């Protein structure tokens, strides 16, 4: 008798694009390498980096995919750093 084991891995949805910045995803170390990179499994860390002249609106630089399939932070965005923008324009 053959038995097939079907696993359903909990994943988080892709985060929206970060205006004036980039998001880099790091999968958890315990996820097998044969699973697709584009999947955001529990423990995946999203790191936020703003472009030059911008800074994170809050101090949170990372977001983590948690067990219920959501991200632990919901309001991360880049805002213009007025002083830095002025220096860049000089």
Image (cartoon, rainbow, N blue to C red):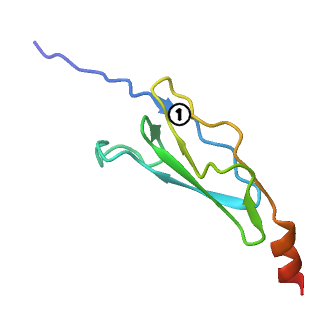
Which residue extends farthest bottom? 90
Picture quarter with the N terminus: top left
Seen in the picture, residue 12 relative to 51 is either above or below; the reply is above
Quadrant of the snapshot with the C terminus? bottom right
The residue located at (53%, 33%) in the rendering is: 12
Residue farthest toward the top in the current orientation of the protein = 1
Q: Position of residue 62 (x, y in %)?
A: 56, 49
The residue at the point 38 percent across, 24 percent down is 8
Residue 17 image point, x, y percent: 70, 50
Badge 1 crowding class, 10 Å Cα cut-off, few under 14, some 14 to 19, many 20 or more, is: many
Instruction: Report x, y in % for residue 63.
Output: 56, 43
Dot 1: what SS? Answer: strand
* Left or right relative to 88: residue 42: left
Q: Is residue 13 left or right of residue 89?
A: left
Q: Position of residue 24 (x, y in %)?
A: 54, 56
Q: Which residue is mark 1?
A: 12
- Taking depth in this image into account, of 24 and 57 the one nearest to the observer is 57
């Amino acid at each position: 008798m053959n038995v097939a084991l079907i696993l359903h891995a909990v994943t988080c949805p892709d985060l929206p694009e970060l205006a004036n910045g980039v998001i880099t995803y790091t999968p958890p170390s315990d996820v097998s390498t044969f699973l697709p990179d584009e999947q955001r499994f529990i423990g995946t860390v999203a790191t936020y980096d703003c472009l030059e002249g911008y800074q994170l609106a809050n101090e949170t630089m990372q977001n983590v995919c948690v067990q219920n399939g959501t991200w632990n932070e919901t309001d991360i965005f880049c805002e213009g750093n007025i002083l830095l923008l002025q220096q860049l324009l000089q």
